Image (cartoon, coloured by chain):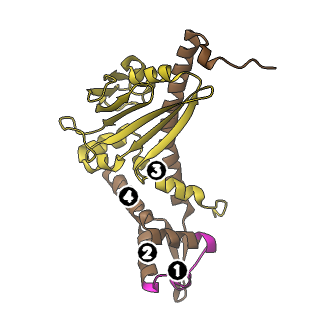
Amino acid sequence: MAADSVEREILIRASTEIVWGVITQPEQISRWFSDEADVEGRAGADGTLTWRRGGRGGGGDKPDAIVPIRVVEAEPFRRFSFRWNHPQEAQPDDGNSALVEFILTEEAGGTRLRVLESGIDAVTHDQEGEAKYREDHEHGWEKHLGELLDYVASKPRGATP
Amino acid sequence: MTATALAEDDALWAAVADPTRRRVLDALLEQGEATTTTLARGLPVTRQAVAKHLAVLDRVGLVAGRRRGREVRYAVRPQRLDDAAEAMAQVAAQWDRRLARIKRLAESVQAEAGVDSQHRRRRTR
C-alpha cells in the first residue's frame, strides 16, 4: 500500500446490486457520506458533495463545505471510483485530487465492499485544497496512514515510561 | 488545524519515511536507550550518519537525548508515536464509519426487498 493511501473493507449482507445503489445514488450518498450530494453515478459526471454547518457529516460549527467530485469509473455492481477535493474550477487529475475507489465483490452471504483512497498527497500540495481537505477529514494524518500505521502497529508496546 | 501543526506533521512524516531512520528507531526501541556510537555498531552506516538521523528524529520529537557525562543517550519518545497512531486510527475510523452506514443502508434495503433466492439464509439445524 502506498504511503498516501487508505484501504478498508466490510462484508454486507445484501446483493451487489443493492450495495451499488447505496454508493452511487445521490439520495443514498447523502445518508452515508456528505449531507447533500449532487452527483450522477456515471463516468465523467461532475458534481459536488456538501457538508452543512452542524450537519451529520461532522460539520460541527464549521461553515458549509462544498467539495467537487468527478466520477471516474462506474462499472455497475463492480466498481465505482471518483476524484474529489480538486480546486473548484480545475479539472481533476492525479496531481490535484484524491482518488476514491469502491470495489464490490460477490461473496457467500452478500457483498464484500472495499474502499481505497489514494493520492491524498496530491490534494495537500494545493494550499487551499489542503486546508479544506484537512478540515473535511478532521485530521491531516490521512496521507500518512498506510505506512505509518503499519510501522507503529508493528512496534512493541508496553515500554512506556 | 494551524499551519504550524501542518508543518509539524509533514516534518514527522519526512522523519519516519526514511528507511535508515526507521532502523534507528527500531534499534532504539529494542535497546531502550543508546548512544550514537552503540547505534552505529548495529547499523550499516557511519556514526556521523546516525548522529544526523538522530538530530532529525529529535527535532520532530520522536526521540530525546539525555546528556550523561561526555555522551548523549537517546531514547524513543513513545508519546509521539502514540499520538501518530491515534490520529491515524481516527482517520481509518472515518472510512469505517462510512462503510458501516453503507452496510446498514444496504441491509435495510435488502430486508425490504425480501430475502431473494441468491442470498437466502441457510436454514439452521
Residue topped by disc 1:
B43
Q: On screen, B109 above or below A92?
A: above
Q: CA distance from mark 4 to mark 2?
A: 17 Å
Residue at image position (52%, 89%) is B70
Tell me, by letter, which chain the rendering colours yellow.
Answer: A
Q: Chain of mark 1?
A: B
**Residue B65 in sight in this render:** yes
Q: Is residue B39 magenta?
A: yes
Is residue A91 on the magenta stretch?
Answer: no
Q: Nearer the viewer, residue A6 or A56?
A: A6
Identify the magenta region.
Answer: B29-48
Read off the chain for label 3: A
Q: Could you say which chain is coloured brown in the image?
A: B
Residue occupied by mark 3: A145
Q: Residue at x 30, y 45 (%)?
A: A123
Q: Position of residue B113 (x, y in %)?
A: 55, 10
Please, what is the three-letter code of the amino acid marked with disc 1?
Leu
Which dot marks residue B8? 4
For residue A151, which numbered disc appears in the image?
A: none
The reply to the same-chain question for discs 1 and 2 is: yes
Query: Height in image: A17 above or below B97?
Result: above
In this picture, residue A7 sits left or right of residue A67: right
B108 or A79, which lies in front? A79
Residue type at numbered disc 3: Leu
Q: What's the amino acid at mark 4?
A: Glu
Disc on the earlier residue, 1 or 2 = 1
Q: Position of residue A122 (x, y in %)?
A: 30, 48
Residue A52 location, quadrant: top left
Tag 4, which chain? B
> Which residue does the numbered mark 2 point to in the structure image?
B53
Q: Are marks 4 and 2 on the same chain?
A: yes
